[in-house]
Amino acid sequence: MDTIAGFFSFITTPVSWVIVQFHSLYGAIFGPDTGWAWGLSIVSLVILIRICLIPLFVKQIKATRAMQTLQPEMKKIQERYKNDKQRQSEEMMKLYKETGTNPLSSCLPILAQSPFFFALYHVLNGIATGTTIGVIDDNLLASARKAHIFGAPLAAKFTDSADKVASLGATLTDVRVVTAIMIVMMSASQFYTQRQLMTKNVDMTVKTPFMQQQKMLMYVFPVMFAVFGINFPVGVLVYWLTTNVWTMGQQMYVIRQNPTPGSKAQAAHLERLLKHVTHAEKTRNRRERGIVKAIVAKGRDRNEFERKFINGLTKVNLAAQADGTVIKSAAGTLTEDEDGTQTTGGTPKRQQPKRQSKSQRQHGTAQGGAKGESDAPEPTSLEKKDEAEDAKPEAKPAGGKPASGTPARSKAKSGQRKGPQRPKSPSKK
């Protein structure tokens, strides 16, 4: 660890200067030799660094969402070239280039603050060994060696011997209890931050190896913090615990205000938005108008939660507009089903008639006359009797010829079409 910290010695002076400036501020309030003055100086250093890293954090969020969007395409490439790893890598790089996505962007905040972390470790190690470093002179060094956080010196480690801890004015039990509690809190905060990201802000409809990798990291990172934490000074543990708490709070805010589409966080976010919009009967600010505008612009590409939001507005006679505003609408407006089909006022969808085959159409034409008679009034019993008598076949004499004077019914008259004809209307008596 000392060797790695030596590589970042160029930033040791700026880090030590920032700590000294904060120490002069808090020292005037709590006393220059107190653990509060030095501990809050380290916490303030973390906050200052993380504020400067907010643009990188925004890029991290965008990169993570872009990677989630590309998961289906990446899975297709893996399945297509599963036996050719080189071609698979080439296609992956081509996909990243076409979409402008960089997988390393999700690691930018961690990589950017690593120099400050190792520089702080270098400063605290100098305090532990009694060596002036950066802008910390002999007077500040003596003050820092006297500072204790809950009985543990800033430069003490979990693995230090009893003699070394005694030289810093503390007991081994106090140091190990404080460092153990801080290591557990540091690992727990890291685990909760990663778990919150996986369970709330991930589109669960996409199942890819990337998801399994993130799930594995959720358990690996806390273990790594626990293993390496025993070699960190108390001041570094304060730095890293503050960083984890800041990351957890920042992520909670982002998940609540700008969740990933298709995630559980988006479902909860749209439920809250629907409640506010229906109560006010309008979008209240620019952010709400932007969300509604994006949902309307998707059209049939809306996911389940976005369709539920649009249908919720419809049930209270509100309609979302293309510019993100919400207006009152008449009853019977359109609602969306799960497949994106729109229905009016909750009535069943209109079914399109099935296409008939050629034989079915010909048969329907032949039966058209019979169907047309279904609308005529039903004849009386006397008329039915006359129709039955007319419908009786004529008796044929021997030889198979019809009787004289009786035309053959099987032959169609000239000008008439073949097939069953409409019967004549019976004579009225």
Image: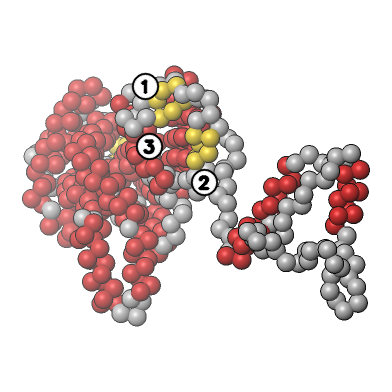
Residue 3 occupies which quadrant of the picture? bottom left
Q: Amino acid at mark 3?
A: Val
Q: Residues within 10 Å of mark 2 (few under 14, many from 20)?
A: few
Q: Is residue 38 visible?
A: no
The secondary structure type at the circle numbered 3 is helix
Residue 82 occupies which quadrant of the picture? bottom left
The mark lying in front, picked from 3 and 1, is 3
Which numbered disc, 3 or 1, marks the residue that appears first in the sequence? 1
Q: In this image, 53 relative to 12: left or right?
A: right
Q: Which residue is mark 3?
A: 296
Residue 338: image tag: 2
Q: Is residue 83 visible?
A: yes
Residue 367 occupies which quadrant of the picture? bottom right
Q: Amino acid at mark 1?
A: Arg
Q: Amino acid at mark 2?
A: Glu
- Residue 332 spot, x, y in % from top left: 53, 29
Q: Which residue is mark 1?
A: 284
